Amino acid sequence: MTRGLFITLEGPDGSGKSTIAPLVFAMLKDRGYDVILTREPGGVKIAEAIRSIILDPQNTAMDAKTEALLYAAARRQHLIEKIIPALNEGKIVLCERFVDSSLAYQGYGRQIGFDDIWTINKFAIADHMPDLTIYFDIDEKTGLERIRKNRTAIDRLDSESLHFHTLVHEGYKEVLRTFKERIRIVDASRSVDEVKESVFDAIRSFCDQRRS
Ligand SMILES: Nc1ncnc2c1ncn2[C@@H]1O[C@H](COP(=O)(O)OP(=O)(O)OP(=O)(O)O)[C@@H](O)[C@H]1O
Ligand SMILES: [Mg+2]
């Protein structure tokens, strides 16, 4: 059986990943691709439980390295229970966020450092890196304005300062430099329809190239 394709959607808060993911998932399914949609941190029961600890607004005492380890733990459980089995069945796995988010948020946002975050994540995921990553490119102010305008409940991470989000953007720039061959950048400041088409086109051309 051929191995499937592991595709991640990355980008800062409010860049539109959760809006676009189900739309692109439906487009791929309609065209006959065998695809599953999942997200981090979560995707399976144990990892969802870890997610709720991470995002709980009452957990103000959470240490940055504890948070980084929890993300890596949730990532591994999700990978083992859901992503690897689906890839072994030849499916396309479309996943919102993966290791690049930790490099940007924990490595830069929390200032733990890119190398330490890479080290703990290498332990968690071994060599199971995405085949393709779509990066939702948007400036931090636009992303945060979208969230504030459209959401009533704000979780612990949304309420971080603008400075934190600026650091996250710096982190993503480092991710883009480090992994440029794996990542396709999409301009996420456009309309939902335009972004959806660009993401779909990037995925379809990658899948078709792999198959030929
Ligand atoms: N292209 C777009 N144009 C305008 N508004 C958008 C667009 N895409 C998403 N939005 C709106 O912006 C808000 C944030 O979008 P979404 O939740 O999809 O972002 P996200 O990348 O998943 O963020 P997070 O990382 O915080 O989960 C939502 O209220 C959504 O309706
Ligand atoms: Mg989201």
Image (spheres, rainbow, N blue to C red):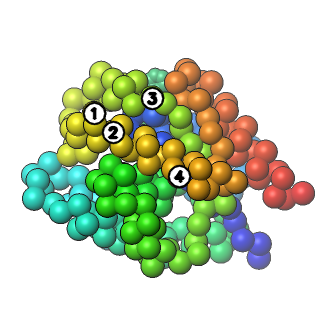
Q: Is residue 184 above or below residue 6?
A: above
Q: Give how far apart the Cα atoms at labels 4 and 1 are.
A: 20 Å
At label 2, the amino acid type is: His
Element on which disc 1 rests: helix
User: Residue 175, labelled with which disc?
Assistant: 4
Q: Position of residue 208 (x, y in %)?
A: 82, 51
Q: Quadrant of the C terminus?
A: bottom right
User: Tag count in the figure?
Assistant: 4
Q: Position of residue 87 (x, y in %)?
A: 64, 69
- Specify the farthest residue to the right: 212
Quarter of the image for residue 112 reads bottom left
Q: Earlier in the sequence, mark 3 or mark 1?
A: 3
According to the picture, the residue beneath numbered tag 2 turns out to be 165
Q: Give how far apart the Cα atoms at labels 3 and 2 are.
A: 10 Å
According to the picture, the residue beneath numbered tag 3 turns out to be 139
User: Residue 197, labelled with which disc?
Assistant: none
At label 4, the amino acid type is: Val
According to the picture, the residue beneath numbered tag 1 turns out to be 162
Q: Residue drawn 47% across and 61% down?
A: 99
Q: Earlier in the sequence, mark 3 or mark 2?
A: 3
Q: Give how far apart the Cα atoms at labels 3 and 1 are.
A: 11 Å
Q: Residue drawn 43% across and 43% down?
A: 170
Quarter of the image for residue 34 reads bottom right
Q: Earlier in the sequence, mark 4 or mark 1?
A: 1
Q: Which one is nearer the viewer's eye here, 106 or 26?
A: 106
At label 3, the amino acid type is: Asp
